[in-house]
């Protein structure tokens, strides 16, 4: 089934709009589906109706996770029918995700762009919206889709169990088998709230913290070459010139970049921008920054955003060595530590952190220094 435009708001069937879903034991997917819908103006005050009776569901304006059909035109979003096998890549050709959608994924697919623009108070045409749509799906919704549809995270036996995920926490909100008095209808709003808080947190994170980090990273990458050249840096439009000067005096090799701190989320952007050719691929190896205690850190750039392996770890003879031996081995007074894997180290001064990176770079075979 090829994606159609997101359904437009329809006039409610009654005085108060109704969102229908199934009764009984609830799950993460329909709880989040309902929460998403209530973020839209037309369903903000909607009543949640929980039933499997088609005569009841037919009175609802939108129905999720029950009813046996996926029909955006009539606002029916179920995924349990045998005929339904669609992933996001099916409904939105060009997207890479093939996991079969649950009701959470279906609602996000059909309304997600509007929801994101609503939450971030920006036009749906804002270029951030499409990128944040992908990030929220990949890092929250797909997991819910997979777990609801029984898709294992890996082949074979996992090395350990994950029992604190959102789907598991929602499942535990259901009354235990020993409780004969609690109605699941009374607890379902708590499930909606739990899923909704995580959903909103992801949107705000990607829109207000993650996205601005992209622009900052581009400035940092460009500035690494500009040794004292303020004219060359004018295109960066950096607001703080004293910081700009410091950024521009890292190392003429361009293999080391400096950040104001290590706290902003740069790694995903870094590798995305490398893939797009905006950042030169495999030419940067180290980042220096100050931590919250004021220590200068030198961090090796990983081989990928989620990897614990580094492109070029700090020197092997420094790793896991403590002072005073570390100072003696490195020849760098003020060196504080080097992690056992070599992915990060610390020094009292900025110059010392740069020296740690430069000594490691100098250790490369000539064929690797290109």
Image: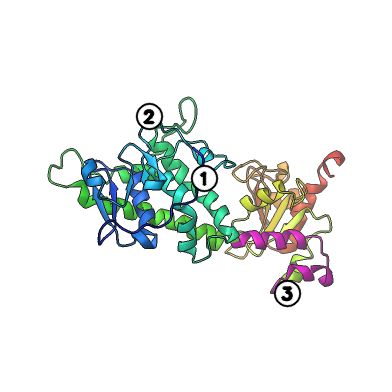
Counting residues from the start of the chain, the first of labels 2 and 3 encountered is 2
Q: CA distance from mark 2 to mark 1?
A: 25 Å
Looking at the picture, the colour scheme in use is rainbow
What element does badge 2 sit on? loop
Secondary element at image label 1: helix
Depth check, front residue: 279 or 252: 279
Do labels 2 and 3 touch, CB within 8 Å? no
Closer mark to the observer between disc 3 and disc 1: 1
Q: CA distance from mark 3 to mark 1?
A: 38 Å
* 227 part of magenta stretch: yes
Residue 358 appears anywhere in the view: yes
Dot 3 or dot 1: first in sequence order is 1
Q: Which residues are magenta?
A: 212-241
**Is residue 356 placed above or below 212 in the rendered structure?**
above
Q: Position of residue 211 (x, y in %)?
A: 59, 59
Q: Please state the horizontal and vertical placement of residue 9, each as a whole percent of the image.
A: 40, 58
How many angstroms separate mark 2 from mark 3 (CA)? 63 Å
The C terminus: image quadrant: top right
Magenta: main secondary structure: helix
Residue 22 point in image, percent of width and height: 26, 43
The residue shown at (21%, 43%) is 55
Q: Which mark is residue 138?
A: 1
Choose mark 2 or mark 3, whichever is in front: 2
View extreme (left): residue: 181
Disc assigned to residue 242: 3
In the rendered view, does 191 fall on the left or right side of 284? Answer: left
Q: Are marks 2 and 1 in contact (CB under 8 Å)?
A: no
Q: Is residue 150 magenta?
A: no
**Which mark is on residue 82?**
2
Residue 331 shows in this picture: no
């Amino acid at each position: 089934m090829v994606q159609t435009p997101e359904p437009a708001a329809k006039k409610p069937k009654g005085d108060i709009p109704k969102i229908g879903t199934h009764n009984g034991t609830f799950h993460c997917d329909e709880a989040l589906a309902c929460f998403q819908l209530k973020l839209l103006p037309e369903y903000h005050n909607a009543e949640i109706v929980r039933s499997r009776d088609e005569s009841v569901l037919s009175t609802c304006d939108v129905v999720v996770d029950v009813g046996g059909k996926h029909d955006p035109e009539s606002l029916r979003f179920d995924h349990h029918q045998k005929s339904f096998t669609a992933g996001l890549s099916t409904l939105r050709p060009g997207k890479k995700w093939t996991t079969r959608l649950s009701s959470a994924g279906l609602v996000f697919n059909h309304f997600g762009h509007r929801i994101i623009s609503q939450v971030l108070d920006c036009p749906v045409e804002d270029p951030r919206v499409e990128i944040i749509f992908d990030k929220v799906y990949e890092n929250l919704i797909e997991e819910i889709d997979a777990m609801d549809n029984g898709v294992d995270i890996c082949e074979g036996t996992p090395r350990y169990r994950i029992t604190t995920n959102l789907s598991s926490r929602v499942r535990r909100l259901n009354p235990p088998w020993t409780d004969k008095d609690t109605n699941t209808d009374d607890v379902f709003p708590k499930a909606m709230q739990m899923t909704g808080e995580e959903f909103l947190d992801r949107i705000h994170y990607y829109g207000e913290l993650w996205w601005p980090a992209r622009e900052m990273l581009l400035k940092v990458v460009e500035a690494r070459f500009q040794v004292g050249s303020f004219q060359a840096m004018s295109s960066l439009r950096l607001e703080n010139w004293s910081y700009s000067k410091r950024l521009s005096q890292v190392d003429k090799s361009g293999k080391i970049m400096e950040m104001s701190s290590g706290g902003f989320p740069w790694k995903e952007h870094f590798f995305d921008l490398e893939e797009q050719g905006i950042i030169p691929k495999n030419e940067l190896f180290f980042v220096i920054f100050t931590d919250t205690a004021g220590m200068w850190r030198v961090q090796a750039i990983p081989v990928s955003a989620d990897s614990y392996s580094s492109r070029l770890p700090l020197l092997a003879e420094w790793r896991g060595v403590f002072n005073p031996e570390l100072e003696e081995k490195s020849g760098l007074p003020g060196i504080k530590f080097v992690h056992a894997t070599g992915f990060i180290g610390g020094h009292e001064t900025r110059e010392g952190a740069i020296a740690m990176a430069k000594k490691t770079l100098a250790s490369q075979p000539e064929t690797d220094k290109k």
